[in-house]
Structure formats: structure tokens, C-alpha cells
Amino acid sequence: MENNLKDIQAEPDFREIDIDKVGVKDIRYPIKVLDKKNKVQHTVGTINLYVDLPRTFKGTHMSRFIEILNEHRREISNKNFKEILEKMKEKFGATTAHLEVEFPYFIEKAAPVSKARGLMEYTCRYTGSLNSELDLLLEIAVPVTTVCPCSKEISDRGAHNQRGEVRVALRLDEFVWIEDIIETIESSASSPVYSLLKRPDEKYITEQAYDKPMFVEDVVREVTIALDAMKGVRYARIEAENWESIHNHSAYAYVERK
Amino acid sequence: MENNLKDIQAEPDFREIDIDKVGVKDIRYPIKVLDKKNKVQHTVGTINLYVDLPRTFKGTHMSRFIEILNEHRREISNKNFKEILEKMKEKFGATTAHLEVEFPYFIEKAAPVSKARGLMEYTCRYTGSLNSELDLLLEIAVPVTTVCPCSKEISDRGAHNQRGEVRVALRLDEFVWIEDIIETIESSASSPVYSLLKRPDEKYITEQAYDKPMFVEDVVREVTIALDAMKGVRYARIEAENWESIHNHSAYAYVERK
Amino acid sequence: MENNLKDIQAEPDFREIDIDKVGVKDIRYPIKVLDKKNKVQHTVGTINLYVDLPRTFKGTHMSRFIEILNEHRREISNKNFKEILEKMKEKFGATTAHLEVEFPYFIEKAAPVSKARGLMEYTCRYTGSLNSELDLLLEIAVPVTTVCPCSKEISDRGAHNQRGEVRVALRLDEFVWIEDIIETIESSASSPVYSLLKRPDEKYITEQAYDKPMFVEDVVREVTIALDAMKGVRYARIEAENWESIHNHSAYAYVERK
Amino acid sequence: MENNLKDIQAEPDFREIDIDKVGVKDIRYPIKVLDKKNKVQHTVGTINLYVDLPRTFKGTHMSRFIEILNEHRREISNKNFKEILEKMKEKFGATTAHLEVEFPYFIEKAAPVSKARGLMEYTCRYTGSLNSELDLLLEIAVPVTTVCPCSKEISDRGAHNQRGEVRVALRLDEFVWIEDIIETIESSASSPVYSLLKRPDEKYITEQAYDKPMFVEDVVREVTIALDAMKGVRYARIEAENWESIHNHSAYAYVERK
């Protein structure tokens, strides 16, 4: 029946403008992602799918993106990103395909003293582009605590501290677990944060963080050094942001390593 | 070991101020919710847990909320809300407990002509308070299409239309499936929206919506009439919002039914 | 010319459903508001305007809301809210009119030691409803610092602290300056926050906050006591939220005073 | 007095990591910007200020960013961006300085038939970096209406349409008014959107848009052609996004022109 309806998208275009990316954006879908401990994890993705459109065509058949998503949402990981992108190129006859998936990722974490367990949420994002080569970027946002070294030094007692966030964007040469990257980042701040802490844990974290004061400048430098040393990391962008407890704005630092 | 550390929260307070709600807010956790078709659905909740705090105590032991969440996240539904709230009252020795859970809920929907299947996301929220009685509010946000009756009437061709959203907040006397409420709402707009539509579906929806033009005023009235007639609905708030295609602001209508 | 086009909104409706609120939502407009120090302040408002619609009419003439907004945006304050609402009732022949205006409000604040000056932003919101009587609610969000009393007590050094926010919603019997309410709230936390601080200020604030540790429970109680004592405050809701530096969620407390 | 307190930031660092950007982020400030019609416009900016930090220093004196902002907020435009960035480089002894300012910009617009006037809001953003050369990017987001050509073609009546947004990022060789860029973009969609429309305007816009159906692909192509032809535009990124009225996700297209 679809054949009876004119296919406007397939008509020729004469404006001589290639379109770099065209597709669907901000579609939310339940997905499964790889999990180091439990093999697979159920979560919810916010997803963009794009292809390039050569100058000769008027439009793109958007429903095909959803059909591809339906086929592949049972597992999305850096392991099958290339396969999905190849399907997109094939189905659209495209030169380049792009797939972006952002999702909350949960890891069970034990408190440092009581060993009480709770789940921590980390926002992750895969951004993949396939032309002849696959370019895959993995982004992870990790909440941390930072104690201000200046405040500690100049004050007779206490030191201002706050929640911060470290965000990294990585190109990898080999498979690396999200869990391992997060652990590396958390150990580069004044302290990790947790969902469940009992009093002995709170004492431990307060003292640990006070003993390890760090500016956003220190945090990005420590994360940079750790990622420089991590096997498989070919490219890295590192951001640290503090929601300053004494201001209503953020302190921010950024390093790019090619 | 926790016993050796002073329990500041448990100390007496002399300011004579009862606190209505105290607890943890905006914690994200993977949860399971009831699903009409598949029995259970994995999703991600944004969760608040509060209790009241009488004037005689200084503070609340926040970690206990996370412990309760850990125990119950395997299933959260209007069926076990009361049980969770009772646990909260018991664990905190509280008079009133509050639990709020917001989550994206996914339903597989067939396109009207091609019957192609795709997943639609609806934002749902349970807000429960337990004193001696349980007060449970179910909120659902449903995206819809609306065609403007005025634009259709006065224009020689076409009619402006747009995506809108209907949001309802309901108190129920008996169990009602989220799926049934959503279907009722979708049939009260110019047309439902879908994730996957083929060309014959697009033709069908365009014509159906054009034949059923509705203001936000019409939408809230139709939803009101449908919910008034729905078995089990004791109280309803109904909002309709259009992201107007000819403005950069919304048209909005609201009805409350006690 | 408008007369030649059929007025669909003015047609009769037979569904017997009164609509509580109908109008325009989330329109952004440059506005002027009263300022204690500079008489008037330029800012940007996000504005909702609604009226009720009796069951006998099909729709509302939405463009009239924008006309009213055009006339009155040169000054919006609790002083002329009633006048605007009366215009709305008159223009729409409505029984009830609602006007909601949210805007960032800026106050110049001197640092505690250096007296260096910077601007602080506070989100404010007026919500007014006029039936026979005016019901006007003023909401203000004030960022603050809080030091955790438990962490301070149990730790050998340091104490976790963070940015928090106190939000109040007030019904007033007489005119009260936004500036005075903000000052009251800021003095009820471990410390105010500032945009511009030099090193001696940072030392002062760190020590002051460490000497005045407060849970969210303490903050809402102190703000409650201060607002109970403030002349002109007839009703108050008080919320305190901490973006905990050791968690990825918030601590929260809420008091309502009728 | 500040001299008595140790300057931790000025201490040497031995980790050998240059920091690309360090500074303050997301500070909101009332600002004035150039306005084609009224010379100057009051608005509210969300502002980031960064400099680079060489490997030899431990930290940055963040308060200096706020001092610079205090001095220059009375006028911010592409005319004095370079001057502000030079001050930043000088004050911090930096090699590179970055200033990012995002703000709502308001333009009075007459409806097409009734000529009724209302204000339209456009989100604008200047991003400037100064090393030896100034690199200045101007971004503007313009809401528009789009009618779907496929839906129009295959349907016996009506055509789905929706609000969309065109976002451009431009590098300019010479001064171009924001107003002129916005007008160019608005004439490249099915129709502009307005805050205030009377019935004859609504008829005009509905018919005009129906007569000019455009995919996101068409919109980016038309804007690309118009910007290619605009004097002073050296580089352009063009995005079009439709909040599809028949889906709960967006259609999206992107072109980059170097």
C-alpha cells in the first residue's frame, strides 16, 4: 500500500547542498548495556541516529532509524556499535552513519568502612561515527567531592568543600570497562561520593577528603596523568567542575590530550 | 563501631518546630514496575523519600532511606506502595511517610495502518503519603497531536497543529492499568503520537487529526469527561499544554475534579 | 477585517465542563521589577497568564493575554499585580484571573571582610490569583552554604559542607522587600554565598560556617523561626535542599506554617 | 591584609600538565548588549570566563574573573569582546583567554497582516577565544514553523506541522546585526513564529506555511544557501530540529560550511 503513496523524500534535489547529518534525535528507549559484574544491565537511553544525505536527494526516510533501533536495543555496547552503524550505512545507502546513546549506568559500590552497599549512577554516552573507519567516543560523568586547598591553608579550622563532577571523553584502542575508568577518576579527587554511608564511613570520607585537598586544576591534572598511563586510551578530554559551596557558580578546568 | 561515634541526629531539639518532611531527594535508581503486557518492566526512577520529624529530635538518619530503597526497588507499584511506606514509618518511628517515584514507562504501540511496532515513552509518577490512611496520587504525561480548530476554520487550506502534552494526576479507588489511562487520553486528542510510522500511517494520522481539530480547552474537557466515566477514578487534575507551532510559547488549560 | 473571520472560540459549548485555568504559558519577556536600592531593575521574566472559562464557551482568545503583557511589562511588582489581574478579568469577562512571573533578581552584595562587591542572583516568582480577593504568593530561592554537624562532630578534622538552597513561598499582609527576606534566610544558614570573594573573605566564611554547622533540619527550623517573627508574613512554606558533597543526591527538609 | 594569607594558587606545580582552560562557569549576570533598533538592550547573561594555565603554576585566582565581569557587563557585544579578552590575558598573564556569554535577546516583531506588535525571544551566544588572533563564534537559536511536505503530498486534507528551531554558529569577517541573521533564517522556514497574532494573521501564516512545506533537510539547505550569500559570513554550522507533531522525538539535520 505504501507504494501507492508518492515518495517525496526520494525525489531529486537541485540545490547542490550535501547534508552532513540527518536523522532522529532525542528518542528515549529502554536498552541493555554490558556490565562488568552482571554481564548486562537494563537502562534507558536517549538516542540520536543520523546519516549523511548527498546533494542529489531531497529527504531521508526517518522511520528506518526506528526500525534499526528496534532491532538492536537488546544490546548496545562498544562491542556492537560498528555493526549497528554498518546496518545504518547499508539501509540508507549512506557514506557516513552516526549513533549517539546516552544512558544512566549503575554500579554497586561498598562504603569504605561499613561496606554497606548502594547503587551509584553515572551518566555515560557513546558517540560513534562510521565512514570507512569507526570513530567511537566514550563519555562518562563522575560525581566527586573536592576540598579547597586554599580554604584549608588559610583557615584556622574547616575547609570549604563541595560536590563536583569529572567528565571525560575518550577514544580507545582496545576494550576498557566503564567501571575501571570510573574507579580511576574517583581516586583522582579528594574523595568518591556514595549513595549509602553509615557514620564510620562519613568520618572516614570527611578526614580522607580533608587530607587530600584539590582544586579543579588538581583534579584534571591527576585524571590526565592516570588516563595517560591507562592502556588503551588513545585520546582524552578531561573536564572538572565544582559546584562551589561558597559561590553560586562553578569552578571549571579543562585539558585535552591528543 | 558506629556506636562509638556520637549520634548528633538523635539529640534533643528545643526550638519547638515540627518538620513536615525530611529525607533524601532526587536519587536515581534502577527499578522494576508492573507492566500490563509483560508483567514487569525495567526502568530508572528518580526517587524522593521523606518522613515527618517531631519537634523533639534534632535530625534524621538519612542512610536508612537508602537501605529501604535497596530492599524494595525490585518491584515498585501501587500494589506495594503502602508496604514500603509502612516500613518507612516503622524504621523512623514517624507519624507520616512520603514516597515519590518518577520514571519513564514504555509501551509497545502498533501504527494505525501498517501495524509497524515501536516503543512509546510516557513519564509516570507515583506520590504516596501514609499517615493513618494511604493517599496515593498517580501522574502520567502523554504526548499527543492537536490541530487548531480556529486555524482550520479561517484558512482556505491547511491548519496549524503541534505536539502537545496531556498530564493527569489521579486518585484511584481501585487498581487501574497505566496502559488504560494512556489509551483514554490519547483518544481524547486530535491524534495519538507514535515512534514508528510508515507513509500510510502518516496519511491516516494527518487526515484523522485534521478531521478532529481540538483546542487545549477541548482536550481537557474530553479527558475530563472520559475520566469522570472511568471506574475507579476518585479525583483528577487534568492539564493540556500545546507547544504552539505558530508561537514560541504554550497554550495551556487546566481542570480539577474532586 | 478580523470580523469577517469566524470566531470559533466564542461559539457555545455543550459539554458542561468549566475550565479552571486557560491561557498562555512559558512566554519569556523583558520586564522591570521594583528594586530596594535602585528603584527599578531590568530582568527577564518567564510568564504564565490564565483565566477561568465557563462551561458555556468553547475557547479563549489567547492573543489578548499578550496584549495585556505588552501594556504592563514596564513594571511588574506586588504593587500592581492586582491591577493587572483586574484588567485580565475585565478583558476576558472572567471570574478568576491568574498571573505567574518568574525572574532572576540581582542584588549587589559586599564580601564580609574585603567589602569587594559582586552581584548575586536569586530566582523569584510571584503567583497571583484574583477572584473577589487577591491571593498573592511570593517565592524566593536563596543559595547558601551548609556544614554538616554530624560530620564535624565525628571527624578528627574537617567537616563535609556543600551548596544548598532555601526556597520560601510566602503570603504577605503588607509590603516586604525581597532584599529583607533574602537577608533573613542567608543569616539562617551556615553562611551566605557570594559571587566575589578575596582570600580574607574565604578564610572568614570557612571559619564562620565551620563554627555554625547546620543540617537541612536546622536550616528550615531557623528560617521558620525568623519568618514567624517577621512582620507582614501571614503564611509560609519553607524548603531546604543540600546538594550533598558526599552523595549524588540531595538532603531535603520542608515546613509549612499556616 | 590579603598578603598575610598564603597564596596557594601561586605555588609551583611539578606535574608537567598544561591546563587548556580554567575559570568560572555558569555565572548569571545582568548585561547590556547592542540592539539594532534601540541601541542597547538589557538582558541576563549566563557567562563562562576561562584562561589557560601553564604547567608551572598550581592554580588560578578565580575572583579576578568576577572583577573583570564587574567592569565590563555594562556593554557586551562583538565590538568589545576582544578588549575584554585582552584584559583577561593581561590580568592573568595568560596565553589564551576565553569568554562565553549566552543570553535571551528580544526583538519587536509586527504580525504579518494586523501589524500587531509583540516581543520575540531568541537565545544568542558569543564564544570568543583570544590567543594571538581573535576567534569569535556567534550562535543564534530561532524558533520557526515547518509543514511536512510528505504529509501534505500523501494526505487528502491537512498536513502535519510543528514548531522547530534553527540554530546557527557563525564566524564573521565583519559586523552583522543579529536582527539580520534572524530575518534570513525566518524566511528560510515554512513560516516565522510570533508572540502576538490576531485571526487574520493566523489565517495568513497557516496558508503561507501550507504553501511552503519544508523538511528539516530543506530548512538547513535554504539557510545554508542564504548564509553562503550573506556578506561577512566566513564559516557556518547550521542545525534544524523539528519537535515533530506526530512523534515524541525530533527530526534533525546539520550542515557545516567552511
Image (cartoon, coloured by chain):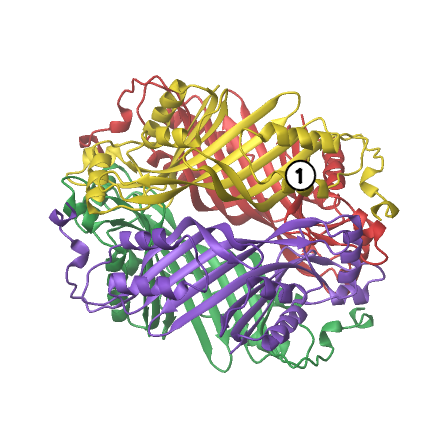
Chain colours: A purple, B yellow, C red, D green
Image quadrant where residue B127 sits: top right
Pick the residue in front: C1 or A40: A40
* Relative horizontal placement of residue B175, taking residue B111 as reference (left or right): right
Label 1 neighbour load within 10 Å: few <14, some 14-19, many 20+:
some
Identify the residue at image location x=25%, y=32%. Answer: B213
Q: Using the image, determine if residue C25 lies above or below residue C134.
A: below
Q: For the residue labelled by badge 1, is the local secondary structure a helix, a strand or a loop?
A: helix
* Relative horizontal placement of residue B120, taking residue A245 as reference (left or right): left
The extreme left residue here reads: A4
Pick the residue in front: C240 or D138: C240
Which residue is disc 1 drawn over? B68
Which amino acid, by three-letter code, is at mark 1? Ile
Residue C19: x and y in percent read: 40, 24
Q: Using the image, determine if residue A16 lies above or below residue B160.
A: below
Q: How many marks?
A: 1
Q: Which quadrant does the N terminus of chain C fall into? A: top left
Pick the residue in front: D230 or D6: D6
* Relative horizontal placement of residue B103, taking residue B68 as reference (left or right): left
Pick the residue in front: A123 or C213: A123
The extreme right residue here reads: B4
Image quadrant where residue A20 sits: bottom left
Residue D69: x and y in percent read: 58, 64
Residue B219: x and y in percent read: 34, 29
Identify the residue at image location x=44%, y=53%. Answer: A46
Residue B167: x and y in percent read: 43, 33
* Relative horizontal placement of residue B256, taking residue A69 as reference (left or right): right
Q: Using the image, determine if residue B203 lies above or below residue A87.
A: above
